[in-house]
Image: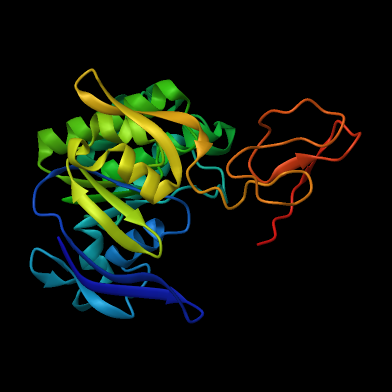
Amino acid sequence: MRLEGVTFGYGGTAVLHGIDLVLDEPGLVCIIGPNGVGKSTLVKCINRLLEPQEGRVLIDGRDVSEMTHKELARIVSYVPPATSDLFNMNVVDAVLLGREGLGGWRTTAEDLEVVTRTLELLDLSEYASRGFNQLSAGQHQRVSIARGLARETDVMILDEPTSNLDVKHQVYVTQMLKAVAEATGKLIIMICHDLNIAAKYSDKLVVMAPPGVIRGVGTPEEMISADTIREVYGIDCEVVQFDGAPQVLLKSEFSDRTNSCNSSGKRSSGKWFVGAGQSSGPIHPGITRCSGSPYPKRARCWP
């Protein structure tokens, strides 16, 4: 997969700025970066949910803009960040939707075999006959992942697939995606906000930063450093090696102090203060207490 000069914006405001990216090996690729840098917009440009305003996306040398949506759907599967439960089908039928368009209009024995295997992989077999609307948010997310896997495409894109999962299933799903990529030779692209999970299980990281650019692409060891986290996220941390992977230990202070104020509205050089009558100490950046009141209010900052 190759992206060449991909630019996209909403309402005249650019979100992506000339993105160049080459992913030429199978494996699990995690896209990380703070909110608002265009991670979801980027993956939507890859699978043509959005059309780049400039540049192009190529898969196996073909420009995706020249493919029909049906052609592209045979190559790229997409798992959105949340699934709207508009109607209540059972879990098997929900996952079978991932097989739509791959053969005839009838469900085949192969379709059922793929769905059964995928439900087992996602630890969902016991819910096979249960109504989709009877599941929790985390179970909804696992069904969505199962539907994407059931499509058996060469490229799979997942937008924050672990966002509604408990920590056990966050680790399980990410481990499973890495194993699937290794076993099948797929390219699996996943947006992830958990830096430690991304660093532990990804084969490659794509680090995005404001104002919608790629800060770097490489292995977790190459991309995860205190300097990079400070530059991209604006927070201080320590990076340590644990169990063969870099792990991020967050510190209590923000490296970008522009939102830290004292109770009079003055910038406080990174210290967080409370109002008169309260003991001093950290509350939250941008929040202070009213004088004589135990309740916090949002602080205001002036230059």
Residue at coordinates 33% horizontally, 80% vertically from top-left?
53
Residue at coordinates 40% horizontally, 65% vertically from top-left?
211
Vertical side of 228 occupied by 242: above or below: above
Vertical side of 129 occupied by 271: above or below: below
> 273 or 237: nearer the eye?
273
| Rendered-image quadrant of the C terminus | bottom right
Q: How is the image coloured?
A: rainbow
> 261 or 247: nearer the eye?
261
Q: Could you tell me if residue 119 is visible in this image?
A: no
> 116 or 259: nearer the eye?
259
Vertical side of 154 occupied by 276: above or below: above
Could you tell me residue 255's position as x and y percent? 47, 44
Could you tell me residue 224's position as x and y percent? 27, 38
Name the residue furthest right.
292
| Rendered-image quadrant of the N terminus | bottom left
In this picture, residue 27 sits left or right of residue 214: left
In this picture, residue 272 sits left or right of residue 35: right
Q: Quadrant of residue 283?
A: top right
Could you tell me residue 2's position as x and y percent? 15, 64
> 296 or 44: nearer the eye?
296
